[in-house]
Amino acid sequence: MRHFLTLKDFTKDEISEIITLAQKIKAQTKDKHFVPYLERQTLGMIFEKSSTRTRVSFETGVYQLGGIGLFLSSNDIQLGRGEPMKDTARVISRMVDMVMIRTFSQDKLNEFASFSKVPVINGLTDEYHPVQVMADFLTMIEFGKVDNPICTYIGDGNNMAHSWLMFASIMGYELRIATPKGYECNSDIVAEAMAFAKISGAKIIISNNPKEAVKNSDVINTDTWVSMGQEEEKEKRVKDFNGYMVDENLMSLAKNNAIFLHCLPAYRDYEVSEETFEKHANEIFTQAENRLHAQKAIMVWLDNHRKSEEIR
């Protein structure tokens, strides 16, 4: 059984295969040609963390593939009343064809997957956000940033930074991550990424200097400084992240045709200036749309793999 829990479970060829499928499905969607790859299948969507893009993209995506999405918040199911994750997994996976979970702990997601009879997709955890990076990759391709790009991530060493670490280290890209002191990436995840980089030839640079990180970059990425559950830390975080806002001064250090990505929601004049956001709005909202197409490809790929294993 293959799950989509983190990119470190996938090879470079498999990631590329999924993205090629995403390009195909996106083209079909634009032509209003909706192929029922997942006809009559049900996607169970468990949300312990609320979301706009994750819910809309998965629910719309499975519908466009011929299936149906079943929204399950923690308030709607026994998980929210203390039922063990392994029991929830063994019940739900007997009733649906695939499960997407957006939760806090990666360990909870992994536990669910280990007891699930169907493929499980990570819609976001505190440690990783792999579906977003797949959408980022599709966007990079569409804007011509796939030939050995120099990628930069500015901001908090959070789940987005961790997912970019895994992505770049597997694909063999150069990735520079600049975070304030005290907000660095998880050291264990960095070590894992460095191990992948030795194999792929990726160049991973970790620093506290956003100007050095952005210099001559092709792709600049950031995320909110105050993620869900960190609202009480906002005042301190805004102070600590002084100098890390992506604005036109910082973008001027990148290549002239560099693109800017943001997984949204974006807080103007905090992690990104209003001017820079609007200047790169086409890239950002193409990236947001690509959550839909990348996730459809992930679902179809997992379903195809499951069917091939059943035949064996």
Image (cartoon, rainbow, N blue to C red):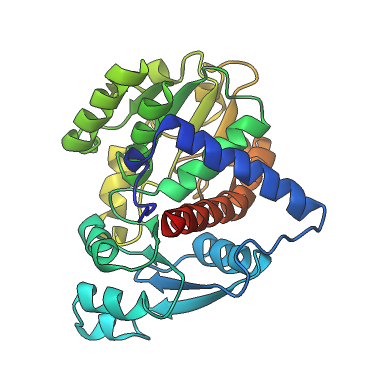
Question: Which quarter of the picture shows residue 155?
Answer: top left
Against 234, is 212 above or below? above
Q: On the rendered structure, is 130 left or right of 248? A: left
At a point 35% along the width and 38% down the height, the residue shown is 161
Question: Which quarter of the picture shows residue 197?
Answer: top left
Of residues 102 and 231, which is closer to you in this image? 102
Against 54, is 96 above or below? below
| Quadrant occupied by the N terminus | bottom left
Residue 93 location (% of width, % of height): 36, 74
At a point 34% along the width and 84% down the height, the residue shown is 75
Q: On the rendered structure, is 268 left or right of 6? A: right
Query: Which residue, as the protein is rendered here, is positioned at the far right?
Result: 31
Of residues 193 and 262, which is closer to you in this image? 193
Against 228, is 117 above or below? below
Residue 102 location (% of width, % of height): 38, 63
Residue 105 location (% of width, % of height): 24, 59
At a point 64% along the width and 51% down the height, the residue shown is 289
Residue 33 location (% of width, % of height): 79, 58
Say whether residue 310 is visible: yes
